[in-house]
Amino acid sequence: MDSIGVLIPIPMSAYLEQELEKRFNLFKLWTIPHKTQFIKDHATSIRAVIGNAFSGADAELIETLPKLEIVASFSVGLDRVDLKKCKEKGIRVTNTPDVLTDDVADLAIGLALAVMRRLCECDRYVRSGQWKKGDYKLTTKFTGKTVGIIGMGRIGKAVAKRAEAFSCPIVYFSRTEKPDLKFKYYPSVVELASNCDVLVVACPLTEETRHIINREVIDALGPKGVLINIGRGPHVDEPELVSALLEGRLGGAGLDVYQNEPEVPEQLFGLENVVLLPHVGSGTVETRNAMADLVIGNLEAHFLNKPLLTPVV
């Protein structure tokens, strides 16, 4: 398989690159000065593309690579892959579900605690010497608060399980009500936001879920409500979120993802009720290595004519 050309557009994982180089002819696009020309010159030898949350395979790239057979995404979300074009061309698509569920769900709870208990602000309070001048102000309890979850897939259910350990009632919204769940279902995101204290975004990014968090939803969540986004940045109407936080119409936010990463609205930097993370939902050594193993496993299965481990298309 070492003659099979595999294109990886941006750095993703040193371990993934190392394992790919052992098995395939790996093209690291970010190391090549004239990228467009390089892709044209090697178009007929590239049979696989590695994608992730920041880079994937759009229609233009797919059309440029006539021998492309598979797009293996180093992520669960596939919003950077043109799935329709892949289906048309018979190109297989895989992702990395399950292995990152725990880390992302852990982070959702961590963000909720960090926002409500002002953990980051407390840390700064100690480091800056302010504690010597007086105690930090009182914060808000997380245990027992109602947690609303948008999207009850693997990650949504994992968040619910963790929140239940904090005695939090769980309510949810998804495309359809799930009869196997004991949690209360709301048929709209506005109703969900009106009936919870903490709102967690855990659904895939699609055209339907883009800006699912808009002004109406934010106002329904209200000045005591907390928004946690561990999904994708475009789930949230970012200017509306910023203005709601600045005006005090929303109680707080814990964000791991943004509209135009790595750009983050600077108006948020000075707010103590906002916790900002650099898209690290699955960012542990253990999980990233497991994700890499799944990418490698899918590529090997494809090129050995075996069933894919996690097929999407």
Image (cartoon, rainbow, N blue to C red):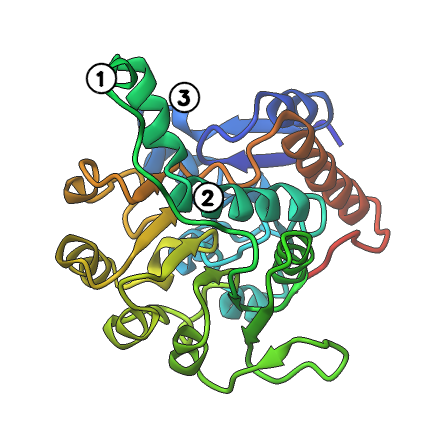
Image point (20%, 36%), residue name: 269
State the image coordinates of residue 185 (x, y, percent, origin top left).
58, 82
On screen, residue 3 above or below 111: above
Which residue reaches farthest front?
134
Secondary structure under tag 3 reads: helix
Horizontally, is 78 left or right of 311 in the view?
left
**10 Å neighbourhood of mark 2: few (<14), some, or many (≥20)?**
many
Horizontally, is 50 left or right of 238 in the view?
right
Q: Quadrant of the N terminus?
A: top right
Residue 131 or residue 198, whichever sits in front: 131
Looking at the rendered image, the disc whose residue lies closer to the viewer, 1 or 2, is 1
Image point (36%, 68%), residue name: 210
- Answer with mark 3 or mark 1, whichever residue precedes in sequence: 3
Query: Label 3: which residue?
Result: 31
Secondary structure under tag 1 reads: helix
Amino acid type of the residue tagged 1 in the rendering: Lys
> How many angstroms separate mark 3 from mark 2 (CA)?
35 Å
Amino acid type of the residue tagged 3 in the rendering: Thr
Query: Label 1: which residue?
Result: 133
Looking at the rendered image, the disc whose residue lies closer to the viewer, 3 or 2, is 2
**10 Å neighbourhood of mark 1: few (<14), some, or many (≥20)?**
few
Query: Label 2: which residue?
Result: 111
Amino acid type of the residue tagged 2 in the rendering: Leu
> Visible in this render: residue 256?
no
State the image coordinates of residue 231 (x, y, percent, origin top left).
47, 55
On screen, residue 285 above or below 86: above
Secondary structure under tag 2 reads: helix
